[in-house]
Image (spheres, rainbow, N blue to C red):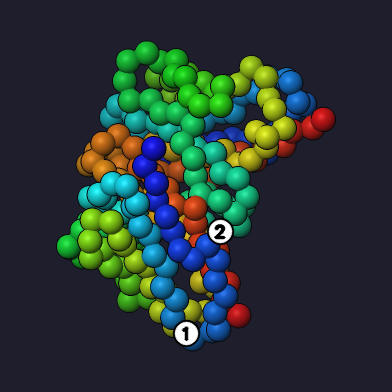
């Protein structure tokens, strides 16, 4: 069965500083990987996804992620964090027909300091 | 983009009563809908998968008689929490899948059982 590990429960970053959120996955086949963001009391918004091809994926809001098969990782990055980026971030691996069944990591809470 | 509407956004009910949560795909037909449960500061846990016109498939440990799922049309799935108890209090999120490469999430429902 697939699994996702997000080693950092929460991270604090100064506004304007760069950000990297870590994600490691375990899956027996080619993974389909996603990053979602969740604001308090809200649903999930897709930031980006990796299915195949270029291992550096660009997403919305200036986020990018790099798939590294050798490290089983799919870390999320942003060069300059804005206060509005404060939220919970979930990494997920897709499986099942159409890769629609998602297994989520436990999430990383991003706090942005002035 | 595709929109999934979940209603209500929050609900408070008395212990022993039943609560119905609706999940609608507003501008697309969803072949499959998923129901997740999220405890405070935890990840999303898949409860069940439903395909239009067929019985839902429940994840291990999820009581199908307590969490009734109906997917009567390609745009509507409902989750009914029967005989709710305080331990059922949680954040419930649905997602809808079109058969493409992405599942779209509703905004979630905060259920509080008192």
Relative depth, front residue between B8 and A72: B8
* Element on which disc 2 rests: loop
Using the image, determine if residue B76 lies above or below residue A28.
below
- Marks 1,2: beta carbons within 8 A: no
Q: Nearest the camera: B52 or A3? A: B52
Residues at discs 1 and 2 both on one chain: yes
Q: Is residue B33 left or right of residue A78?
A: left
Quarter of the figure that contains the N terminus of chain B: top left
Residue farthest toward the left in the current orientation of the protein: B53
The residue singled out by tag 2 in the image is B39
- Front position in the image: B37 or A105: B37
Calculate the distance from the C-alpha at mark 1 to the C-alpha at mark 2: 21 Å
Q: Position of residue A24 (x, y in %)?
A: 48, 30
Q: Residue furthest front?
A: B27
Q: Secondary structure at mark 1?
A: loop
Residue A62: horizontal and vertical position, in percent? 56, 22
User: Is residue A42 visible from the viewing direction of this image?
Assistant: yes
Which residue is located at x 70 percent, y 27 percent? A82
- Asked whether, in this view, residue A107 is left or right of residue A111, the answer is left
The chain containing the residue under callout 1 comes to B
Where is residue B12? Give x, y as percent.
57, 75
The mark that comes first in sequence, 1 or 2, is 1
Residue under label 1, please give it: B17
Q: Residues within 10 Å of mark 1 (few under 14, many from 20)?
A: few
Q: Percent position (x, y) of residue A79? A: 64, 17
- Relative to B25, residue B53 above or below: below
Q: Left or right: where does residue A14 sit relative to residue A51?
A: right
- The answer to whether A97 appears left or right of A77 in the picture is left
């Amino acid at each position: 069965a697939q699994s996702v590990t997000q080693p950092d429960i929460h991270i604090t970053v100064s506004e304007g500083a760069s950000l990297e959120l870590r994600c490691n996955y375990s899956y027996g086949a080619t993974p389909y990987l996603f990053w979602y963001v969740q604001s308090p009391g809200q649903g999930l918004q897709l930031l980006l996804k990796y299915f195949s091809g270029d291992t550096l994926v660009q997403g919305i809001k200036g986020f990018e992620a790099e798939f590294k098969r050798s490290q089983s990782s799919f870390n999320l990055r942003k060069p300059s964090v804005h206060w509005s980026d404060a939220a919970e971030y979930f990494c997920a691996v897709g499986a099942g027909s159409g890769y629609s069944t998602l297994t989520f990591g436990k999430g990383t809470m991003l706090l942005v300091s002035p | 983009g595709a929109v999934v509407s979940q209603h209500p956004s929050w609900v408070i009910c008395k212990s022993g009563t039943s609560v119905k949560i609706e999940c609608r795909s507003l501008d697309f037909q969803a072949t499959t809908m998923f129901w997740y449960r999220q405890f405070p500061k935890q990840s999303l846990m898949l409860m069940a998968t439903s395909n239009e016109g067929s019985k839902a498939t429940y994840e291990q440990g999820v009581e199908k008689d307590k969490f009734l799922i109906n997917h009567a049309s390609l745009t509507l799935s409902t989750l009914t929490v029967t005989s709710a108890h305080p331990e059922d209090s949680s954040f419930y999120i649905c997602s809808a899948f079109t058969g493409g490469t992405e599942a779209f999430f509703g905004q979630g429902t905060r259920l509080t059982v008192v």
